[in-house]
Image (cartoon, helix red, strand yellow):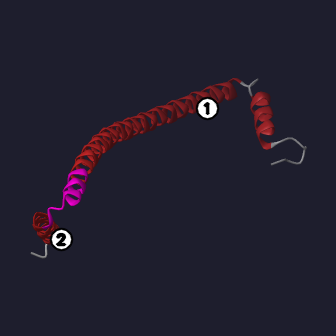
Amino acid sequence: MYNRSGMGSRAADRAHLYSRQSNPSTSVNAEQTHRLMEEQNDEKIDQLSIQIGALKKMTQDIQNAVKEDNRFLDGMSQDFDHTDSLMGGTLKKLGNMMEQGGGRHMWLLVGFVLVVLILLYFLMTGKY
């Protein structure tokens, strides 16, 4: 904001302080004001350092959680790869059996697999 003389309010305040510093009592007041401002600044700096410390701890906790989740996902990926190779082997064996024409055995195997899948479904959904 500007006062009537055209200076900004901060500049006017500074000019007012400097003009009063020639008086010894004003000098003491200015020193007290300066000391008070320094103490307030120190308090604010301490508060900021505490908040920065808290933010740093939170970011470290987030980083640790992300690393743990990545390890978990890597383990799941390996498990899925292993399951994929097992399923591929099983499907190859089923394909070979189909080509050889083991009709009765094939129907028994298909029935067994269906029963197992149905039981697993009911056990997993809790409808059993």
Bounds of the magenta span? 92-103
Q: Of the numbered discs in the image, which one, if any, rests on residue 51? A: none
Which amino acid type is marked by label 1? Thr
Spatial CA distance of label 1 from label 2 is: 73 Å
Q: Mark 1 points at which residue?
A: 33
Quadrant in the picture for residue 128? bottom left
Compare residues 21 and 33 and report the one nearer the observer: 33
Horizontal arrangement in the rendering, residue 120 relative to residue 72 (left or right)? left
Residue 67 is inside the magenta segment: no
In the image, taking residue 41 as reference, residue 89 lies left or right, namely left
Residue 121 found in image quarter:
bottom left
- The one nearer the camera, 22 or 97, is 97
| Badge 1 element | helix
Q: Nearer the viewer, residue 71 or 45?
A: 71
Asked if the residues shown at circle 1 and circle 2 are in contact, with their CB atoms under 8 angstroms apart, the answer is no
Q: Where is residue 73 in the image (x, y as percent from the top left)?
A: 32, 44
Query: In the picture shown, does residue 106 fall above or below 2?
Result: below
Residue farthest to the right, as pictured = 5
Q: Is residue 85 above or below residue 44?
A: below
